[in-house]
Amino acid sequence: MSQENLTLVTGATGFVGAAVARALAARGYPLRLLVRQGTSRKHLAELPAEFVVGDLNDLDSLTHAVKDCRYVFHVAADYRIWVPDPEAMIATNVMATENLLRLAYAAGVERIVYTSSVAALGLHPKGGPPADENTPITYDKVVGTYKKSKFLAEQMALKLSDEGIPVVIVNPAAPVGPGDVKPTPTGVMIRDAAVGRMPAYVDTGLSVVHVEDCAAGHLLALDHGEIGERYILGGQNIPMSEVLRLVDEVVGKPSRRMRLPIAPLMPVAVAAEQMARMTGKEPRLTRDHLKMAKKMMYFSSAKAENALGYTYRPALDAVRDAISWFDRHGYLKA
């Protein structure tokens, strides 16, 4: 294939990455997908794409992946709220991202869409307006390794754009919908609530975006985004209690749940993290979960709506499509 016909997607075996790959395929973009050795590709089997086996931390595989590409969508990231080795996450989300952007530029890639996260952005106190791309944030105020890594990676991408690398940044909120294979932390919450395994919750809020709207926003950023600009790809801002009510509405089984205060849960989170270090299994509750829950994670997509033509559907649609997909693929079995 010639350079003008190839679009590379990293992270295509993940939730958002797969949705981006499907959206690109529907638009007729010939695809090259960077996948790790041994990662399942079953949910991508129908896509007409070239699969390249590699790893973000392997420079040779990145060099090969970007060769002859016109566009790059860098969606891949290590997305976990808790990790036993923070340095490994920093290496993947920050250093490998810088390597990929520089290699893509050196290979003559015309435009790069980098998938950051609202985790890299500031938040207003509870009761304040939804945050936007200009809400202040400093590194010392960022909670948790994942958010710190995305903050550092985004700052690095902005710096590289100043150096002439053609990168546009998108900041997805909380994607929900079909194809959440792993599933993501948000998907786990919806699945657990759907099967009655979430009797309690903490008082926080999310910007729920249908994963297909999020993917469409990526393509809009390719077509209309300005180099060096950030665009929040958010959705409906709703409290956790409303997210859970929507789950109950979809499954048709209203549940009684307790709202729990944050402070008494801290010792439980500490114990869960200690257990995780012994077992190697990611904990369901961490101190970072609780610290993040102290603010409503509400975001405005006004900039993307005005500049890109971005739109999003109601959270109910996203929750309904997620539960339907989980049900069809056996995730809701007892």
Image: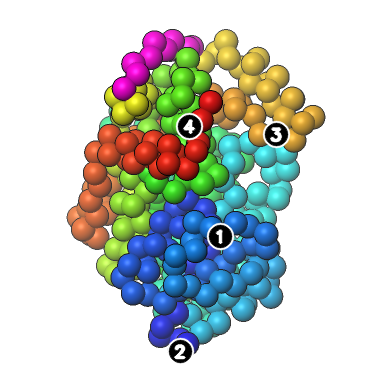
Evaluate if marks 2 and 1 touch, with contact meaning CB atoms under 8 Å apart: no
Amino acid under disc 2: Ser
SS for tag 2? loop
Return the disc, 4 or 3, that comes first in the chain's sequence. 3
258, 152: nearer the viewer: 258
Q: CA distance from mark 1 to mark 4?
A: 22 Å
SS for tag 4? loop
Return the disc, 2 or 1, that comes first in the chain's sequence. 2
80, 45: nearer the viewer: 45
Amino acid under disc 4: Leu
Return the disc, 3 or 1, that comes first in the chain's sequence. 1
Return the disc, 1 or 4, that comes first in the chain's sequence. 1
Q: Please provide percent x and percent y for residue 81.
A: 58, 37
Task: Check if residue 14 falls in the magenta segment.
Answer: no
Residue behind mark 2: 2
Q: Is residue 178 above or below residue 143?
A: below
Mark whose residue sits in front, 3 or 1: 1
Residue behind mark 3: 281
Magenta stretch? 252-261
Mark whose residue sits in front, 4 or 3: 4
- Pointer 3 local density, CA inside 10 Å: few below 14, some 14–19, many at least 20: few
Residue behind mark 1: 41
Return the disc, 2 or 4, that comes first in the chain's sequence. 2
Amino acid under disc 3: Lys
Q: Please provide percent x and percent y for residue 244.
A: 37, 24
Mark whose residue sits in front, 2 or 4: 4
